[in-house]
Image: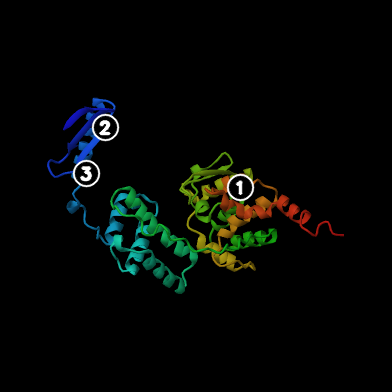
Amino acid sequence: MAIKKVENGYEVSFRVNGRGSREHRKVFPTKAECERFQRYTIAQFETQADVKPWLEKPKDMRCLSELVELWDDTHGHFLRDSKRRKSKILMIVNELGNPAGSSLTRLEYTRWRTQRSKEGKSPKTLNNDLGYMSSMFNTLIKAEEIHYPNPLADIDNVRVPERELSYLTHDQITELLDETKRGDNKHVYLITKISLSTGARWGEAEGLTVQRVRNNQVSFTDTKSGKNRSVPITPELFEEIHEHAKLTRSNNIFTGSITSFRRALARTTIELPKGQAAHVLRHTFASHFMMNGGNILTLQKVLGHSDIKMTMRYSHLSPDFLEEATRLNPLSNIK
């Protein structure tokens, strides 16, 4: 290295890799700045020299089934539905032909999804498939198990038509409760009443224990959203549940009763859209809650919705909404 004083400061000139390498020449106001520039330039060169392209990792050719096992070890086995989720992902992997994860393309996946749609799979199922696969890639990237981008990241969900939300009228509620009393299952009537009174899913009501019915409240745990919630009930229903628990002589108040409910529903005159058997009880609670002037945020908490958008499906049943629709429509002021 050579540093010499020049007319407007100090000039430094040096080569970082000996004769034949590039010469660095620069002028600074002080000699100290020349020295700092030289040290910085040499450090940059040495850092770059440590990068050896011929030693870079080869392309990751692990097949999707191997990635599923990695995902299961890293994250999957902690999920509540771990076995079902893993089985579902492996089914998708098998149908895709189990390619290397790094070789999977958006086009390849969307063509497979189109074929699934032609076979009659619903948009919701197709979106669940995409969600499971994309989540697997994201988890592995976060865990630094793979070092390439999520190949499915830019694929959009299939648009899902909004489902009809049926609810029972007062007459239908009476008819259904009468029918559930007539069956040979001693639990189905009371589970139905709890679902209608609290908006609980059938499995949540069916899984109640004695400890979860206290102080005129029922508490639901291990829910779909993963959050516990408590809902008040009338003193009459509270007593009815505890009297029933005495008969069962068990900490679990009820046993599996969904089949008996479906049989009771089939004996009524009630007709429902496909897939809305016991779930109509939850819709009925929410619909009557809003029609009776309930608050949408309170309903969200009672139902345990993590996203208010789910609860807003019932907002059109609010009396205020209905009143404004009739009062503010364009024909309202025409005589």
Q: Secondary structure at mark 2?
A: strand
Left or right placement of residue 322 versus residue 67 in this view: right
Report x, y in % for residue 67. Answer: 29, 57
* Residue 176 in sight from this viewpoint: yes
Task: Quickly name the residue at label 1.
Answer: 299
Report x, y in % for residue 261. Answer: 55, 62
Task: Quickly name the residue at label 2.
Answer: 27
Query: Toward the viewer: 117 or 147?
Result: 147
Numbered label attached to residue 137: none
Q: Amino acid at mark 2?
A: Val
Outermost residue to the left: 19
Q: Earlier in the sequence, mark 1 or mark 2?
A: 2
Picture residue at 20% right of the left edge, 35% below the top? 13
Report x, y in % for residue 274. Answer: 56, 67
Picture residue at 28% right of the left edge, 63% below the top? 100
Task: Quickly name the residue at label 3.
Answer: 48
Query: Toward the viewer: 112 or 307?
Result: 112
Q: Earlier in the sequence, mark 3 or mark 1?
A: 3
Query: Up-down: is 71 above or below 44?
Result: below
- Circle nearer the viewer, 1 or 2: 2
Q: Amino acid at mark 1?
A: Leu
